[in-house]
Image: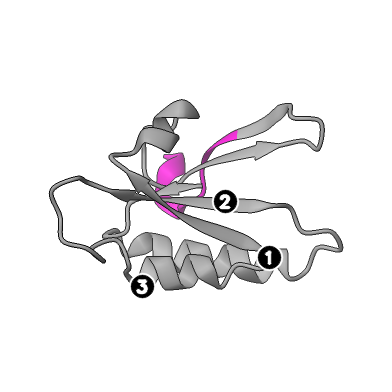
Amino acid sequence: MAVHPKLPMLTGESRRTAILLTRVPHPPVVDVLVFRPADVPAGWETTGLWTAASAIPGAHVIRDDEGGQARVFGTLASGSVLLYSADGRLLVSGGITSARGH
């Protein structure tokens, strides 16, 4: 998941994701890329979203300087989610916020 830490709507989505993952027998590996521009003070990215993402079972919350890692995966929008199979095939690519589907 690639996110912008200043978008409050994603905090709720992260919490819903955490709840869902506690209900599956074999939770997936979850990496949350948190965008951080170069010209901001230290800790700028550590928001409620960072805290909510950290609550996702097994999540690795990663500071994504300048969005470099998100670009590697081709994600351009905050809230983009990529789901891969155990053998590395991309299964799902899209958004998870309720506003993304219209």
Q: Secondary structure at mark 2?
A: strand
**Mark before the other along the chain sequence, 2 or 3:** 2
Q: Nearer the viewer, residue 64 or 80?
A: 64
Whether 101 is drawn above or below 60: the answer is above
Q: Nearer the viewer, residue 43 or 15?
A: 43
**Disc assigned to residue 31:** 2
Q: Amino acid at mark 2?
A: Asp
How packed is label 1: few (under 14 Cα within 10 Å), some, or many (20 or more)?
few
In the picture, the quarter occupied by the C terminus is top left
What residue is drawn where x is 40% and y is 60%? 10
Magenta span: 93-102
Which image quarter: residue 83? top right
What residue is drawn where x is 60% and y is 61%? 59
Q: Is residue 61 magenta?
A: no
Whether 1 is drawn above or below 72: the answer is below
Between label 1 and label 2, give the one nearer the viewer: 2
Which image quarter: residue 6? bottom left
**Place of residue 15 in the rendered image (x, y in percent of width and height, measured from the top left):** 53, 70
Residue that badge 3 annotates: 48
What colouring style does the render use? one colour
Question: How far apart are the alpha carbons under marks 1 and 2?
Answer: 16 Å
Question: How far apart are the alpha carbons under marks 1 and 3?
Answer: 19 Å
Locate residue 21 relative to residue 37 in the image: left or right.
right
Residue that badge 1 annotates: 20
Whether 15 is drawn above or below 7: the answer is below
Q: Amino acid at mark 3?
A: Gly
Q: Nearer the viewer, residue 86 or 13?
A: 86
How packed is label 3: few (under 14 Cα within 10 Å), some, or many (20 or more)?
some
What residue is drawn where x is 50% and y is 53%? 32
